[in-house]
Amino acid sequence: MSVLVDTGVLVAHANARDREHAHAVALVDRMMLGEFGSCLTTDFVFSETVTAVAALTRRRELAVAVGERILAEREPRPFVLHRVEPATFDEAWRLFRQYHDKDLSFVDCTSIAVVRQMGLDGIVSFDGGFNGIVTRYG
């Protein structure tokens, strides 16, 4: 099994005041136990996550710590960072235009494109906009 981890889970895990914090901690604990297999995230999600953590908590050092954890190269690696390539970007733009009736950001559409292109089992996310498009865990 392999999944992509979405911004909301990573932000809620880092931000103790987030209403989904406890849920995010439980999900990350399950990830660390290998319950979801390989956990990937993208450079777009990374950008969105560290920016949101810094803005929401006003603690830049926390945002840096979150970024360092995502980028960690020691074993066990919590996440594999996938860099969005031009073909994925183009597919995400197509999806963004296609799903105009869904509440999906462009970053969400890059995540959908990555899940599909890499044949991942789904996405770990609190975002219901993914429902009916890719399997959502969370």
Image (tube, helix red, strand yellow):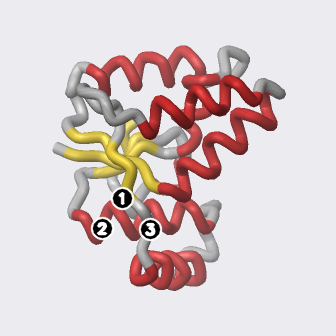
Q: Which amino acid does label 2 sit on?
A: Arg
Q: Which residue reaches farthest left?
A: 1
Count the marks.
3
Question: Where 4 falls versus 104 (above or below)?
Answer: above
Task: For marks 3 and 2, give the CA distance.
Answer: 13 Å
Task: For marks 1 and 2, give the CA distance.
Answer: 8 Å
Question: Which disc is residue 84 wearing?
Answer: 3
Do the residues under discs 3 and 2 have CB atoms within 8 angstroms?
Answer: no
- Image location of residue 113, percent across then percent down: 39, 70
Question: Which disc is residue 43 wearing?
Answer: none
- Label whose residue precedes the other's in the sequence (3 or 1): 3
> Which numbered disc, 3 or 1, marks the residue closer to the eye?
3
Judge the density around disc 1: few (<14), some (14-19), many (≥20) Cα neighbours within 10 Å.
some
Element on which disc 2 rests = helix
Question: Which disc is residue 134 wearing?
Answer: 1
Question: Residue drawn at (48%, 18%), measured in percent from left and top?
Answer: 25
Quadrant that contains the N terminus: top left
Q: What residue type is labelled 1?
A: Val
- Label whose residue precedes the other's in the sequence (3 or 2): 3
Q: Which of 103 and 71 is in front in this view?
A: 71
Question: Where 137 falls versus 115 (above or below)?
Answer: above
Question: Residue drawn at (24%, 34%), measured in percent from left and top?
Answer: 36
Question: Where 138 falls versus 93 (above or below)?
Answer: above
Question: Residue drawn at (72%, 17%), measured in percent from left and top?
Answer: 17
Q: Nearer the viewer, residue 40 or 122?
A: 40
Picture quadrant of residue 99: bottom right
